Amino acid sequence: MKLDRILPFAKKLLEIAIPSGAVVVDATLGNGHDTVFLADLVGPNGTVYGFDVQEEAIRTSIERLENQGLADRVTIFHAGHEQLYKLIPDEHHGKVTAAIFNLGYLPGSDKTIVTKPETTISAIEQLLEIMVPEGIIILVIYHGHDEGAVERDALLTYCQAINQKKAHVLQYRFMNQQNNPPFIVAIEKR
């Protein structure tokens, strides 16, 4: 297949956006895969700020980072991503180059604990305030469950209304696949 699948496409966008030494955000730690990827991209002089509300996600992410020797590049907050503006130190406001969200629920965990559109939208707005010009936000939207469909609809409505003078918004999805496959919304600050 010549077309990139969803997650490889998201990683390509992040690779383009994140130079060594960058400040980035993993807004939903999950199982730590993106956190490790981001920590590798920022290099030894960069910083990753990670957020999650679930202790299991934090524990798994820390273990994965330690196993890769990358834990010293990451600061993890046991908090929702809607608190990122106040938790990311002021000296990094205006320096964030990228962020990723994997929305929905933590795979293999309690499916009743899900991301919510109001907290995700709040986090996006905060990121747009503290990002560098051309900073990129990647939303990986998993919508194959009831709450995921609600969040998808709210985010698409919100993202379509972002002023084009503030950001470019791209949707990348496969339209003819079954079972509500995930898709990406990428927001590039102007």
Image (cartoon, rainbow, N blue to C red):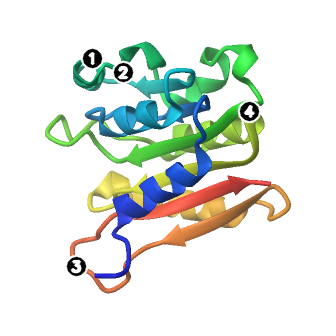
Label 1: few (<14), some (14–19) or many (≥20) C-alpha neighbours in 10 Å: few
> Which quadrant holds residue 165?
bottom right
Q: Residue at x 52, y 50 (%)?
A: 14
Q: Which residue is mark 2?
A: 70
Q: CA distance from mark 3 to mark 4?
A: 37 Å
Q: Are marks 2 and 4 in contact (CB under 8 Å)?
A: no
Badge 1 marks a residue whose secondary structure is helix
Q: Which mark is residue 117?
A: none
Where does the image place residue 54, in percent across and percent down from the top left? 30, 23
Say which residue appears at 31% left-offset and 86% top-offset: 176
Q: Indicate the amino acid at tag 1.
A: Glu
Q: How many callouts does the rendering have? A: 4
Determine whether the residue tagged by mark 4 lies in a helix, strand or loop: helix
Residue to which mark 1 is pinned: 66
Image position, residue 72 (x, y; %): 42, 13
C-alpha distance separating marks 2 and 4: 24 Å
Which residue in the protein does label 3 denote?
178
**Which x, y percent locates residue 169?**
65, 64
Judging from the image, what secondary structure is the residue with disc 3 in?
loop
Question: Earlier along the polypeptide chain: callout 1 or callout 4?
Answer: 1
Q: CA distance from mark 2 to mark 3?
A: 37 Å
